[in-house]
Amino acid sequence: IFKESKNKSLWKFSVIPGIEESTFNKVLERFYDLGISGLVRENIQNSLDGKIPGETEPVIVTIKTGKVNKNDIPGLDNIKERIECLVGHNSYTKETIEHMQNKMNQDEVDYISFEDYNTKVLRGAKNGQSYRPEDTWGIYAYNKGVHSEEEDSTLEKSRGGSHGIGKIASNAASELHMMYFANCDDEGDKHLGGTVQLIEHKYKDKYYRSTGYFTDIKKIENNEERFYPYENTFSEIFKKDTRGLKIIIPFLREQFNNEVDIIKSICDSFFIAILENKLEVIVNDKNINSKTIKKYIENKKYYNQDISEMKEEFTPLYLSTYTKKKPMQVTIEDTKEKYNFNLYFNYDESIPKGRVAIIRTIGMKIEDKKVKGNVNLLMQS
């Protein structure tokens, strides 16, 4: 197991001349408000976007929740030192810092992990912060709000969203705003990275940016310093021994740690991907696949089955419409492009409010809207 030197921090923050921004990244609050559904959606979407072209087996994502000892969380002591240095300048920031300080000294903390299979890997980890578009490790690990683009334009258009922006959802789920990602590439090389989202701060008489990176740093030619990842020799929950990516979030917020809500989030956003055998998700000991998903959606433990009482959750209706109705072909045009849909339409007078869901090509629901009148629609792009 990797032992942290007392003289070396595993986390790196960039030095700045002085503090200009004294608040937390607003995107953190946005994903915090979305709760567990935002976290599940973002991480599974990224796995689906990373499916290997031509692969006939579904993308598999395993989600695990549990406890981890603080001594097994790499670099935690340095992050605790940084959090002790944070200074808030408004009530929200002060409350957030106080909350982080109250949570950071627990001996054992909750965590959640998302591990995928049958997916493309992050490439070029050995090249570190190379700035080359083909080195997707460097883009994912060190660039905020940027994702690598597919060479195939059709694949790029079908993606669920931005791999770069979405990963901050994992930071928002942590009491300390920290997350790690383990990668095993085509050649079996294993690396561990991570990010933490604090505020700009003063630490040991210097000022630092808000974002910290779990990374090594090395000098290259012209005495320039660049980030390079650590080889993954860390404790068990941080390991990724098969091809793909694994997200690990320690200090998981209590309101995010609910297995029923996790399973509902999977069904709500990805029921078509699962029914079409594009995706399989294992939550602890529960396997949600094309053969088992109906038993969850049609189970009162997870969803209200009374149509007249459905107020916010309509996945049972969408499932029924999609599996029982034949699609109609619909084309919508604008000045630039034609958009082709399969329209699944169901009319049922017992439905109090009409709903429309729009499903992206990868099988992920991207819209869920009310419709005036007594109709229920399901659209799949």
Image (spheres, helix red, strand yellow):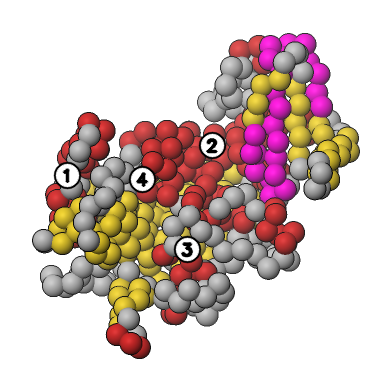
Give the amino acid type for the residue marked by disc 2 in the picture: Ser
Q: Quadrant of residue 101?
A: top left
Q: Give residue 130's quadrant in the image.
A: bottom left
Asked if residue 40 lies left or right of residue 297, the reply is left
Q: Residue at x 29, y 42 (%)?
A: 23
User: What range of the chain is rendered magenta?
Assistant: 345-367
Mark 2 crowdedness (10 Å alpha carbons): few <14, some 14-19, many ≥20? some
| SS under mark 1 | loop
The numbered disc on residue 265 is 2
Identify the mark nearer the N-term, 1 or 3: 1
Residue type, numbered disc 3: Tyr
Rendered location of residue 333, percent (x, y): 84, 40
The residues bearing labels 1 and 3 have C-alpha atoms spaced at a distance of 29 Å
Residue 356 forms part of the magenta stretch: yes
Which label is found at residue 137? none
Image quadrant assignment for residue 182:
bottom left
Identity of the residue drawn at 81% across and 32% down: 344
Between disc 2 and disc 4, whose residue precedes? Answer: 4
The quadrant of the image that shows the C terminus is top right
- Report x, y in % for residue 167: 46, 52
Furthest toward the left, the residue is: 205
Nearer the observer, disc 4 or disc 3?
Answer: 4
| Distance (Cα) linking label 4 and label 3 | 18 Å
Q: Is 262 placed above or below 7 here?
A: above
Secondary structure of residue under mark 2: helix
The disc label shown at residue 140, or none: 3
Q: Are marks 2 and 4 in contact (CB under 8 Å)?
A: no
Amino acid on which the number 4 mark rests in the picture? Asn
As drawn, 140 above or below 39: below
User: Dot 3: within a 10 Å radius of its alpha carbon, few (fewer than 14), some, or many (20 or more) residues?
Assistant: many
Which residue in the protein does label 1 denote? 87
